[in-house]
Image: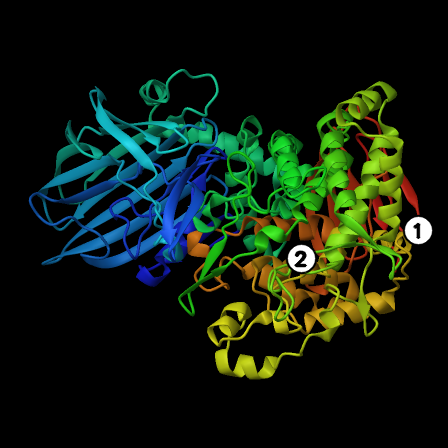
Amino acid sequence: MTAGSWAYDGYDPAQERLREALCTLGNGCFATRGALPECDADDVHYPGTYVAGCYNRLVSRVAGRRVENEDMVNLPNWLPLRFRLADGPWLTPDTATVLAHHQVLHLDSGLLERRTRYGLGDGRSLTVRQQRIVHMADAHLAALRTEFTAEGFAADFEVEAAIDGGVTNAGVRRYRDLEGRHLTHVHSGTAAPGTVWLRCRTRTSDIRVGMATRLSGDKAAGAVTTRQEHPRAVQEMRLRLEPGRTVTIDKTAALHTSRDPAISDPLRAAIDRVGAAPGFEELLESHLTAWDQLWRRADIDVPGEPGRILRLHLFHVLQTLSPHTADLDVGVPARGLHGEAYRGHVFWDELFVLPYLNLHFPEVSRALLRYRHRRLEQSCSAARAIGRRGAMYPWQSGSDGREETQRLHLNPRSGRWLPDHSHLQRHVGSAVAYNVWQYCEASGDAEFLHTKGAEMLLQIARFWADSASWDEHLGRHRILGVMGPDEYHDAYPDADRPGLDDNAYTNVTAAWVLTRALEALDILPEPRRRELVERTGLDGGELEQWEDVSRTLYVPFHDGVISQFEGYGDLAELDWAGYRERYGDVRRLDRILEAEGDTVNRYKASKQGDVLMLGYLFSPAELQWLFGRLGHHLDEEIWSRTVDHYIARTSHGSTLSGLVHGWVLARARRAEAWTFVQEALRGDIADLQGGTTGEGVHLGAMAGTLDLVQRGLTGMETREGALWLDPVPVPELSSYGFAIRYRGHWGVRLRMEHSRVEIAVPRSDRSPIDVRLADRDVCVQPGETCHLVLPD
């Protein structure tokens, strides 16, 4: 296995779901899981094809209640291609003898290759080699090449290819009690010799889907026949296998939906596209060119095993959010386009994804922020519904921006359906605002900041100011009845209503949003500021309120550390050693305690970084400034005690947790940072969350590990029109490099070597780049390479 590939040897049914997720191929518009084409969906395999932004809403009966859920739809399966000796049983790894099986994901080329050698008895064997692409240049095409080689026999052979419209959403076991049949009006037919089509639509969102496949073979292959076998369109081919001679069959697929621009009918577009598509070799050539261009813009040079994993992470980020995504109305699906976990919803994971994209594909970041802007009015309506002004973004978003968070969730350990209060995580609005600001600082996109960005900042700030209530006793503003990022704590022990008061992360980020919104309004061109004030009814009294709230929000402390929320210090300590001894893996401590009849709300125990998220978002200097603005002293000693307190009480029940802790520890307790960095790197490849990766990768954690190298270890900040660097010397990763796109400069290369940094700016007509370090400022001209020795 090389840095440019990811390989699996041997067939292991228990690992198949994980491999299918990690071998998913996509292009930012749609993706297909890495399932074997000869295998149907069952308890081992789960082929799935997902189009970005394609959702459907269904109603289920759960625990005696009517529950409505919106899901990213599993679309018709274009993969099916099965084979057998004439009139014999179909060959699959689950029903036939497997002599050898090897699967390789070629990261450099976006190509999935498999070789399987089936034993047929009496010294006979059949080798099947397949190459698969989801085209990165033409975002509506995919192709599968299959080569059959007989060893020790000659025989007639049958191949059956199909488009399967009978698929459902059944890829997540705990959702299987929910309605999952999203497709209706399935029809199929034949378009031209060797080409079949299938059309359908989603049941409530009424998205029309058109798919067409073309089957062709080399000279040794026979003619293609077709039949319609509802809900499948089927193609058959008979051929003659001779010993040692390879027969090749190509299947090309085209996929369109009614959400696509510049088409009139998705079925006609799919038929036309597959008809005009070139052969496999030519498709592969243009596909490779597109991937080469992506790697040049985004590649990261990190040595050893960490570098290999980072390339896999980058590969999956690019497959979910490619330059094609810039043309779509979609957000960041938390589990990529790789499976059905979280129902394909958009959470706050963009907070971990956009900082990386900003410095490589700012056009994609802008498109993802426009997804949020298009749903600004929906968020304002949600705020009005609870008596608030401004915009209250949903914790889970889908097609139209309404709150998609489920109100019940299943604890698989106890089998009980429980109330879900995670919609109280109002801090998602602060994540949107943070990404607006970070994007504009990195790209220099003043037009976006002055228009859509300012509108979002204003309405999110307005929500926070209106959510803050004055407490005469404290002499401070408070934000009551929320949940923080921790997610374990959703209420006080024995409380009759959900919600917590003064979550430190929520209050500090709200203060930051209010401060940045005031700054953005101050720098707006006067005509634009006047427009915004007129449209929103903003007045001087409201701005004075924002200023006041931004300086007086309450941040609780206990025992000399920042409290996760008011009252946290009164909670009981958990017997961590006892629970680890009894259960081993306590990542999902909440489920363990609930199954015991207890609740994590009683304990000082966190699922993931909450207070420590502040150290992830803000540099030490900015965090001290924020606390100082709020009237609190935060020095290194207090922060270090805070870090120690929460590290000892966190179960890491989220893949984001290791990332956040590694990032924070790189500056607070450097010797322990690498343990958590490794946890973040291995989260998906080792499936550390116990079976969850097979339901879809954790895209935020994958992008976050890339950003850990890009911004975390370099201490890179983009602010005040300059690149700020404050590198952290982590012994396990002292040499690395990457290229970024910064304020119109393409391919700015940074190379860190122990105590030195090299910055190379390509020739262009752009202005010089100001680089600021702790002890000096440097101006790097286009066409210049600068070598800097870092201070000790």
Amino acid type, label 1: Asp
Above or below 397: residue 193: above
Identify residue for label 2.
484
Q: Position of residue 252 (x, y in %)?
A: 32, 30
Mark 1 or mark 2, which is nearer the start of the sequence?
A: 2
On residue 308, which mark appears? none
Q: Is residue 33 visible?
A: no
Above or below 151: residue 203: above
Front residue of 411/208: it is 411
Report which quarter residue 229 is drawn in: top left
Q: Is residue 722 left or right of residue 143?
A: right
* The C terminus sits in image quarter: bottom right
User: Residue at point 88% right, 50% down?
Assistant: 551
Give the crowd class for mark 2: few <14, some 14-19, many >=20 residues within 10 Å: many
> How many angstroms separate mark 2 from mark 1 (CA)?
37 Å
Above or below 46: residue 670: below
Q: Position of residue 606 (x, y in %)?
A: 64, 67
**Disc 2 on helix, strand or loop?**
loop
Q: Is residue 360 left or right of residue 223?
A: right
Q: Nearer the viewer, mark 2 or mark 1?
A: 2
Give the crowd class for mark 1: few <14, some 14-19, many >=20 residues within 10 Å: few
Identify residue for label 1.
775
Front residue of 274/607: it is 607
Amino acid type, label 2: Gly
User: Residue at point 76% right, 59% down?
Assistant: 504
Q: Is residue 45 left or right of residue 217?
A: right
**Disc 1 on helix, strand or loop?**
loop
